[in-house]
Image (tube, grey):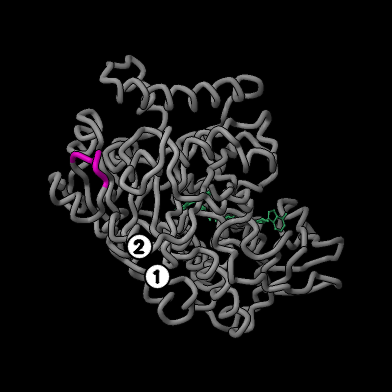
Amino acid sequence: MRQASAPSSHPLWRDGIDSLSLPALTSDLDCDVAIIGGGFSGLWSAFHLLHFDSSLSIVVFESEEIGFGASGRNGGWVSADYPVDLATLARRYPTKDTQGFAELLAKGVDEIGEIAREIAPRARFRKSGSLSFATHERQLQRLRDSVDQRHQLLTYEETQSKVAIPSAIGGLFTENCATVNPRGLLLDLAGYLQSRGVLIFERSFATHYDDGPPSNDGGLWVNDFRVSAHWKILATEAFTPKSREQIPLYSLMIATRPLSAKEQAALQWTPGLAIAEATNNVNYAQFSADFRIALGGRGARYPFAGHLDRALESDTRTHRNLSEMIHKWFPQLGGSDQHSSIDVTHHWGGPIAIRRNWESRICVDHRKGLARLGGYVGDGLTMSFVAARAVAEEIVTGENPLAEMPISTDCSKAKKWPIEPFRYIGANALISSIARLDESEEAGRQSPTGRFLKRLIGR
Ligand SMILES: Cc1cc2nc3c(=O)[nH]c(=O)nc-3n(C[C@H](O)[C@H](O)[C@H](O)COP(=O)(O)OP(=O)(O)OC[C@H]3O[C@@H](n4cnc5c(N)ncnc54)[C@H](O)[C@@H]3O)c2cc1C
């Protein structure tokens, strides 16, 4: 029997898309806007700033390389999903425009598509919607409860016609989702920004960005060089220095070898369709443009004190669970003992940032000349686009375009996570309770914790 070689531990998306190899900052510098972080939040901020005022001098500083963070490692769902459901948002912000917010995100998917078609061919943007499928009655009930004007319930036959998952008994479909190669989108976006005069430095680590207004010499230091900027935008997501405002959790992914034509025929997977099982834990997949199953999920433990630990990017248990999921979802691909016969060629992971209320944050402090955006949980591709546009608009016009939206723009009111060790105990108890809840549901057992967990995670 052929022995499969060990999976590569770099993201699938790196294959064939070389790093940009940009220079590091080696001298002092003046600019209008300094952006810290070279992921989607940082690059979309530069993109929108140029749109609002093309005369601005904009510089991006990335401590590693463009795409090092979650933006280069994610599942490639460009979706209108938000970690907190609309009903919960409406309860939290009774006077705000919750439907308008959902529309803004849905429109964001199409706007990213238009931009990708123009400037990012390597994104391979394909919009075919997303399907959340149920494999038992409790999941199906959850899907029924989620039907709204953008999400429609599918019968067994309708679900199977989108992708052949023999155990799926029904599904929930929305057209507001596309799939991409995220690294292709990000690096092509970086190339476009450079062509428009944005300076991007890699291996350029920024410090002291929160020290006060530029006029007080509260400035920015990058690689020990002084950067004078009227505005600083902090776009460092889970890599933001430890604070109690957010915690990092690891999200993990695997990708298979390209499937043969016969195997593809057995899946009947609508090209570009994103899929997820309606579990309480997050398990999702896309079928890549080069015919691989790229499947992701959570479950790795929270690291004590939020200390980022690269070992958690290859959490063996979570990667094994993801592998087994391929067999569970697609038994027609063959295999035995819960293992699919399809080799896994890549496994990787990365940190996402979670705020106490599971909402994103967009804060613009005019006194300090400092804007912050992030806290997207696992839904950052579209939200970073929307958040970056809001930040750019407020910096250029002074107006907050999201004033009527159910999103907090006052960072001073951020709810904090508990101190350690309570945070460690609580976060890991939450992770294992969600996994146990899925097991109970699958076994047809009632779980007393279900409603409580739903409140905790805002869904
Ligand atoms: C495995 C995984 C799967 C995911 N799947 C999806 C998905 O399918 N759809 C979706 O919408 N979202 C998904 N997400 C979430 C999404 O990827 C993120 O929300 C989004 O990429 C965040 O972008 P960002 O630019 O804010 O942060 P990042 O991409 O993390 O970028 C932050 C950057 O800041 C840099 N940095 C940090 N500190 C400094 C400093 N002091 N100086 C200079 N640079 C600094 C870091 O090196 C990093 O590159 C996933 C995330 C992961 C990890």
Q: Nearer the viewer, residue 166 or 126?
A: 166
Q: Position of residue 374 (x, y in %)?
A: 53, 51
Secondary element under disc 2, as helix, strand or loop, is strand
Location of residue 90 by image quarter = top left
Asked if residue 252 lies left or right of residue 23, the reply is left
Q: Which residue matches tag 2? A: 178
Q: Position of residue 204 (x, y in %)?
A: 77, 63
Residue type at the position of mark 1: Phe
Asked if residue 77 lies left or right of residue 66, the reply is left
Could you tell me if the residues under marks 2 and 1 are in contact, i.e. CB atoms within 8 Å?
yes
Residue type at the position of mark 2: Ala
Q: Position of residue 324 (x, y in %)?
A: 44, 38
Q: Main secondary structure of the magenta part?
A: loop
- The residue at 14%/51% (across/down) is 158
- The residue at 29%/55% (across/down) is 267
Q: Which residues are magenta?
A: 165-169
Secondary element under disc 1, as helix, strand or loop, is loop
Tell me if residue 357 comes above or below residue 99 in the rendering: above
Tell me if residue 205 comes above or below residue 159 in the rendering: below
The CB of the residue at mark 2 lies under 8 Å from ligand 1? no
In magenta stretch: residue 168: yes
Residue 125 is marked as 1
Q: Nearer the viewer, residue 53 or 332?
A: 332
Quarter of the image for the C terminus: give it. Answer: top left
Q: CA distance from mark 2 to mark 1?
A: 7 Å
Tell me if residue 103 can be seen.
Answer: no
